[in-house]
Image (cartoon, grey):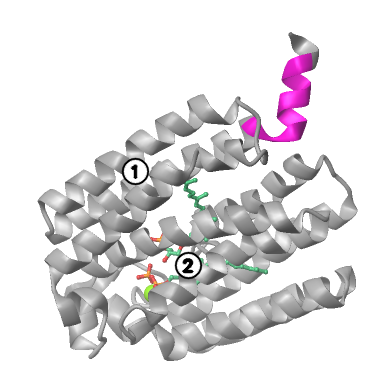
Amino acid sequence: MNPYIEILRPVNAVMAVITVILMALIAGRFDVDVLIACIIVFTATGAGNVINDYFDHEIDRINRPSRPIPSGRITRRAAGTYSALLFVLASALGFYLGPLPGLVVASSSLLMVYYARSLKKRCLVGNITISFLTGMSFVFGGIVVGELSASIYLGIYAFLMTMAREIVKDMEDVEGDQVEGATTLPITHGMRVSGILAAAFMLSASLTSPSLYIIGIFSILYIPVLAVAVLFFLRAAFMILKVQDRETASRVSGLIKAGMAVTFLAFAAGSGTVTGMAAMVI
Ligand SMILES: CC(C)=CCC/C(C)=C/CC/C(C)=C/CC/C(C)=C/COC[C@H](O)COP(=O)(O)O
Ligand SMILES: CC(C)=CCC/C(C)=C/CC/C(C)=C/CC/C(C)=C/COP(=O)(O)OP(=O)(O)O
Ligand SMILES: [Mg+2]
């Protein structure tokens, strides 16, 4: 893959764009603003990934040597310029949509730079920041389509599940993080405590998630698809409670990501737009 595409981590950026599409499905609104919001979230998330690799070049030499900077396919300097251009583009498009979307994009961009530069290495603060940003992608979509309160509920669930995944990823990355002097949770409090906390986030989000049907954000079509996602999360939680080594952490991180993708399908199935279409067919 072209290293300038690869460094954006397009799979993550597309997953973040899906949050905006889901908010559009809930609101039943599909217009040029939604398209611009999708471009903004792709660009801002991509820029965040690039600046992250810019600051993580030493850690990634140990933890992820095949990434574009440690493998020598992109220079650090080029990555710095690339991320700055992408952040400016995303923020400019945000202000084109309005002052509130513009402020959300600009402040999220600054937070991503601050995370990559210093917050990442601090115990739990880095995890909370990245989880907050992930939740904010729903809230940004909600602002654009005019469904703020629903987007806050979805943002809270994205926050909880991302907390679980970020802790698990820290369990996977202990080796390189220790060399860099990072104070992530598994380094300061050990792998067992980290595994228990990650499982607690997964279980609390999974077991309360039917509430999104009960409070009326989604129709009944949400429930059967959600049940499949919950199976992924429960399996991930029990795996990390049982064994807390690097290999298990890597498998659990993948399992959570797959569960997130299935949750997106559940959100889509239960949205007003898809439920309305299903009712017309039946
Ligand atoms: C039970 C329930 C309702 C759970 C909700 C789960 C949910 C909807 C999560 C959504 C998370 C989300 C918006 C993901 C988008 C992709 C993204 C931006 C993830 C953040 O990833 C940061 C990570 O550190 C990147 O790592 P890697 O994937 O290993 O490259
Ligand atoms: C609200 C708006 C406009 C955008 C939100 C943008 C989003 C979805 C951000 C979510 C978090 C995210 C993917 C940020 C990008 C950079 C980042 C912090 C990646 C994770 O890096 P590390 O914690 O170093 O993990 P690695 O070990 O994989 O490098
Ligand atoms: Mg990194």
Instruction: Provide the residue span drawn in magenta.
Output: 270-279
* Label located before the other in sequence (2 or 1): 2
**Does the image show residue 78?**
no
Q: Which residue is drawn at 50% across and 38% down?
A: 210
In the image, is the residue at mark 1 within 8 Å of ligand 1 by its beta carbon?
yes
Residue placed furthest toward the front = 214
Left or right of 16? Residue 85 is right
Prevalent SS, magenta region: helix
- What amino acid is labelled 2 in the image? Ser
Three-letter code for the amino acid on which mark 1 is drawn:
Phe
Other residues around mark 1 within 10 Å, as few (<14) / some (14–19) / many (≥20): many
Q: In which quarter of the image is residue 186?
A: bottom left
Q: Where is residue 184 in the image (x, y as percent from the top left)?
A: 26, 79
Look at 87% across and 68% down and name the residue there: 97
The correct choice, above or below, for 118 with respect to 61 in the image is below
| Residue occupying the point 25% across, 86% down | 183
